[in-house]
Image (tube, grey):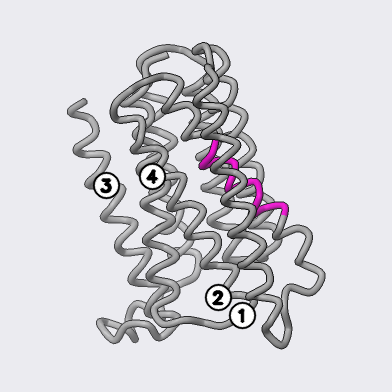
Amino acid sequence: MLYLIPYAVIFWIFAFVSILIKAAREDEITFQKERLSQLPKSLFLIIKFIPALTAFIIVLLFRPTISLFYILLAVAFVFCLLGDTGMETKFLVGVGLFLIAQIIFIANFIWQSLLSGISFLPVVAFVTAFLVWILVIIFLTNYIESAETGLGQMKIPLIIYALTVSLTFCSALMLWLTAGVLLGFIPVIGAFFFVISDFAIGIKEFHHHFKKAEIFIFTTYYLAIFLLSLSVAIYIF
């Protein structure tokens, strides 16, 4: 467990620097704005994906067993890493890479729930949570569509992605209730932050650029990655 301390330090140092650079580029901060905003994009991309890279390394190196659960968890972080780069080059490519990451998270959590002997209550929680997220997605879609441009041709792909990332939360919740591990709520919170971060991106990109948008989006995203990565220390399969 001691390895989590240097991991957390490295993760959050690079996450914090990444947030500062992005915020400076978007005129959201004044601290060292000129210096940070003028850093080469290639350097920013390297700094941006290091947190996801460290998440991948920590899961792969310190998994308690050679269970498929940890391998798939690590692979999901690889696609998050690639998605970090994609989002800075071509939005749709980034969404596609993160979609693959979400599908891997979902498949992993559901499969492990089945292996752990899923019962009625976790299934009910899964379905209930998903229905709630569907209502949220309907409301959010209508809200974004009220803008002058709306979602346009991106509507269907983004609704599919929104449903998928919501299923990540639902499947993490189901695994927690199935495994009965006390700290299993931590990855659930991580999945929740993933949903919030991605929904915020939708609002920023297709409705309006709200105050401190990049700081909010990046912070919730890094919280999501970090808390989900702690699954390696919370679950033993």
Foreground of the two, 18 or 224: 224
Q: Secondary structure at mark 2?
A: helix
Q: Which residue corresponds to mark 3?
A: 10
> Dot 3: few (<14), some (14–19), or many (≥20) neighbours within 10 Å?
some
How far apart marks 3 and 4 lie (CA) works out to 21 Å
Pick the residue in front: 103 or 120: 120
Task: Judge whether 11 appears above or below 72 on screen.
Answer: below
Report the span colored magenta: 160-170
Residue appearing at x 38%, y 48% in the figure? 51
Residue bearing the label numbered 4: 189
Q: Does the magenta segment cover residue 159?
A: no
Q: Amino acid at mark 1?
A: His
Give 122 or 54, whichever is nearer the viewer. Answer: 122
Residue 206, percent from left and from top: 64, 76
Q: Residues within 10 Å of mark 4 (few under 14, many from 20)?
A: some
Residue drawn at x 32%, y 84% is: 33
Asked if marks 2 and 1 touch (Cβ < 8 Å), the reply is: yes
Q: Residue at x 34, y 86 (%)?
A: 34
Q: Which residue is mark 1?
A: 207
Side of 67 relative to 89 (left or right): left
Residue type for callout 4: Ile
Alpha-carbon neighbours of circle 1 within 10 Å: few (<14), some, or many (≥20)? some
Residue 227 left/right relative to 80? left
Give above or below for 179 relative to 151.
above
Q: Secondary structure at mark 3?
A: helix
**Helix, strand or loop status at disc 1:** loop
Q: What's the CA distance linking mark 1 and mark 4? A: 26 Å
- Residue at which label 2 appears: 204
